Every structure is written in C-alpha cells, then in structure tokens.
Image: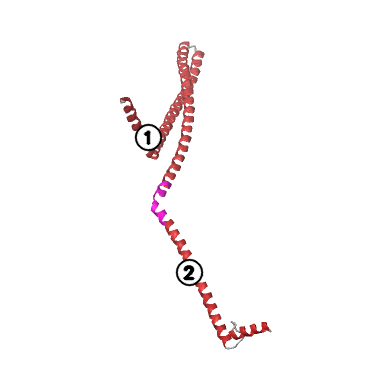
Amino acid sequence: MFKTLITLVRGQSADTAQAITDANALTILRQQLRDAAHGVESAKRSVAVVITYGEREKKALHRIAQQIEDLEARALDALDKGREDLATEAAAAIAELEAERGNTEKAIATYDAETRRLREEVSLAEQHLRVLQRGKQLADATAKSQRVRGTMPDGVINSLREAEATLERLQDRQGLSEATAVAMADLSATGSAEATSARLAAAGCGAPLRPDAAAVLDRLKQTRT
C-alpha cells in the first residue's frame, strides 16, 4: 500500500509538472529560442576567435619564411667569405626556424580544419534556429487567434440564435398578416360587387339573380302540358 501511495504521489507530481509545462509551453519555447540564439552568437564569436588565431599563425609563418630566406642568403655570403663559423651559426638558426615553421604549419592546418567544422555547425544551428523561430511565430499567431475566439461569450452566440428565430417568427407573422389583408380586400371587393348586382337585378336591370316563386310555378305548369 505504501508503495502504491508513493507511486500515486509521483504520478500526481508528474501530471502537475506536465500540466504546468503544457500551459506555459509558448513561454518556455520563447525562452528556449532566446537561449539557443545566445548560444549561436557565442559559437559565432568562438569561430571568430579561431579564425583570428589562424590568421596570427599565418602571419608568423610568413615572418619565419622571411627570416629563413634572410639567414640562408647571409649563410651563403659567409661561406663565400670563408666564414664557416658564421655559416654554421646561421645554419643552426635556420634549423630552429624550420622546426618552428613545421609546428606553425600544423597549427594553421588545425585552425583551418576547426574553422571549417565550426562554420558548418554554426550554419546548421542558424538554419535550425530560423525554422524554430518561424514555428514560434506560427504558434504566437495561433495563440492570439485562440484568445480572440475565447473572448466571444457563449451567451452572445445564444442571443444571436434567439434573435434569428424571433426574426423568422416575425417575418412569418408579417407574411400571414399581409396574406390575410389581401384576402379581406378580395372578400370586400366581391361582396360589394354582389350587392350591386342584386340591386340592379331587383330593379329589373338584366336577368334576375335568383329564381322567384312565379317563375318556378310557370316552369312546373309547363311540365304538365
């Protein structure tokens, strides 16, 4: 049981930590990108330092080559003048310079290789950083859009729907009222015309609208003859 409780506490702690991370993911991402950008800038400065060291060694190599050339010329001149002791001293200095030149050339090769490697790493890091920054911009835009959507209360949507239903009912009633008014007008017009016809018929103008008793009696008598 105790082990189960420990596992439960650990699980709740992990869930809480994950919930905090998820709720603040965008803030965490921004800081991570700031840290990454700072790291890239530091790497670029490191590349610049390596390049500077390499350039310094190349200048040293040029200086050594000039010294060797100068000593060789002087040693030959000393030999021409029978000063082998001076020529020997020059030869020793040249040997030291040649050893130094070899070490300098190795250093230059190392710096050049390191510069190429660092340049490639920095270039890849910059590309990766740009991709992540574009993703962060999209995440920012999405978050803003979600916040805008979140500002629309549910009551507004319900009110709009209720207003739409009310408008439909109003339009239906207005349509029914209009149809009723038209029908009433038709009825009024018809009733007025019928009354006028009845008055005219009663005055003997035109055929009677309804058969009278005398006409019916005459018709019955005719059927007996």
List x then y, in percent, for residue 193: 55, 80
Q: Note whether residue 24 is visible.
A: no
Residue with the mark numbered 1: 18
Q: Note whether residue 194 is visible.
A: yes
Q: Amino acid at mark 2?
A: Ser
Q: Is residue 113 above or below residue 205?
A: above
Magenta stretch prevailing secondary structure? helix
What span is colored magenta in the figure? 145-159
Question: Is residue 147 within the magenta segment?
Answer: yes
Q: Amino acid at mark 1?
A: Gln
- Assign a secondary structure to mark 2: helix
Q: Earlier in the sequence, mark 2 or mark 1?
A: 1
Q: Residue at x 43, y 56 (%)?
A: 161
The quadrant where residue 210 appears: bottom right
- Are there few (<14), some (14-19), or many (20+) residues within 10 Å of tag 2? few
Residue with the mark numbered 2: 177
Q: Residue at x 48, y 64 (%)?
A: 172
List x then y, in percent, for residue 34: 39, 37
Name the one closer to the observer, 196 or 158: 196
Which numbered mark, 2 or 1, is in the foreground of this view? 2
Does residue 167 appear to the left or right of 190 in the view shown? left
Name the one closer to the observer, 174 or 125: 174
Question: Is residue 225 within the magenta segment?
Answer: no
**Residue lying farthest to the right in this orientation:** 225
Q: Is residue 216 above or below residue 6?
A: below
